[in-house]
Amino acid sequence: YKQQIGEGNEGAEGQATMFNHNTYFSDANYTISRNNIFLRASSIHQKWTANSPKDSGTDQIMSSHLLMDGNLFVGGEIGVSAGGNIDHNTGHRWSNVNVIDNVMLAIGRDQPTNRTLGWYIQASDWQSGNICGNYLLHNDNPFVTNLHGILINGHSSNITASFNLIYGLKKGTSSTNVGSITINKGPKEEIRITDNLLQLVDSKIRPVVVDGIEEITFMNNKYFSEADIEVWFRSNGKDYSFDAWNSLVVDTDSSSEELSFLDPERTFETYLLSIGINPTIENFVAEASQQSKHNWRRALTAQQINEYIREGYGSISCPNKGSTYFPLIN
């Protein structure tokens, strides 16, 4: 990994480019990505594509039955993107995509391509899917202003985003197109935003920005932001306070409150300190590269690190584990 020098996508000397990613899955079906550690991506940690036939002019399901479960992501500029690449903007390209119980830390920190992206999870043109139990935490680079916790766009239907924690995504302004959960224009059906903790402490990000509310259900979420309370929510070009929003969409059993957590400043680096490793990615990689079946340290696994992070927030997780979304494989 080497940060892009200047502008463009020059690949010399291993420079980061917007075309290089930690993993790249094209038109995948029945695929599991579980308990992996992804560090400092050149751009996207996990890029998934569903490429409709180029000459058809019509979108179709090209990728289905995907499960991203229990992974750890640190740095880079985008966590999980199930969006590109060939899109005729006519319909769905994905079916049964599940992003479950992952931990994402400091997405955007590295600015590998010198862009100001900090996108955690992007879902585009899904026919069905679940984004559940993910911890989207601690963008800590003040120059990274193009932030999204969860971004749902395109032709999307039957998607549930639930039991996710979004905390520490810091931004000094309340941009009209940036929300911790953003749902943009495009045909939407049966989108459910439920049981999420959207806690934007020390940040002026709006909790929710949506273009159109007719097909979106909100329920039992807990919202907080340092933004002016009158602009916490935005839909179709208008700003809303929590009370006005609740009247507009009937956000059942949701509340506006700042939650207290046991230790919300836990990071990948504080974890390394807790196990006696100098807190740099290079030092972690040096230790992890010595793993073998004869010399196995659970302390260097995604499971152990994610447990440590989750404990700082009360260990909330997806009530329906990944296997229940993927019965034909598990």
Image: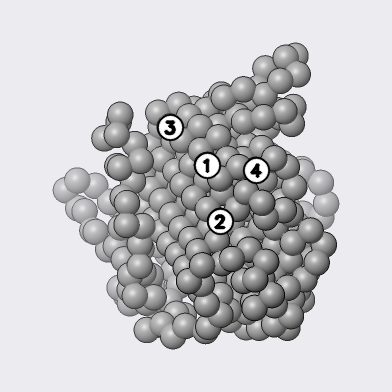
Looking at the image, tell me whether mark 1 or mark 3 is earlier in sequence order: 3
The answer to whether residue 77 of the structure is visible from this angle is no
Element type at mark 1: strand
Residue 265 x/y as whole percent: 46, 80
At x 62%, y 71%, the residue is 246
- The CA distance from mark 3 to mark 4 is 20 Å
Element type at mark 4: strand
Q: Are marks 4 and 1 in contact (CB under 8 Å)?
A: no
In the foreground, 102 or 319: 319
From the viewer's perspective, tell me whether residue 208 is left or right of residue 237.
left
From the viewer's perspective, tell me whether residue 6 is left or right of residue 264.
right
At x 38%, y 70%, the residue is 309
Looking at the image, tell me whether mark 2 or mark 3 is earlier in sequence order: 3
Q: Which residue is mark 4?
A: 188
- The CA distance from mark 4 to mark 2 is 11 Å
Element type at mark 2: strand
Tell me the crowding category of disc 3: few under 14, some 14 to 19, or many 20 or more residues within 10 angstroms, Cα based: many
| Residue lying furthest top | 55
Q: Are marks 1 and 2 in contact (CB under 8 Å)?
A: no
Q: Which residue is mark 3?
A: 65
- The CA distance from mark 1 to mark 3 is 14 Å
Looking at the image, tell me whether mark 4 or mark 1 is earlier in sequence order: 1
Type of amino acid at the residue the image marks with label 4: Lys
Type of amino acid at the residue the image marks with label 3: His
- The CA distance from mark 2 to mark 3 is 24 Å
Tell me the crowding category of disc 4: few under 14, some 14 to 19, or many 20 or more residues within 10 angstroms, Cα based: many
Type of amino acid at the residue the image marks with label 2: Thr
Q: Which mark is residue 158?
A: 1
Residue 325 x/y as whole percent: 35, 41
Q: Which mark is residue 217?
A: 2
Q: Within the image, what quadrant is residue 286 found in?
A: bottom left
Q: Quadrant of the C terminus?
A: top left
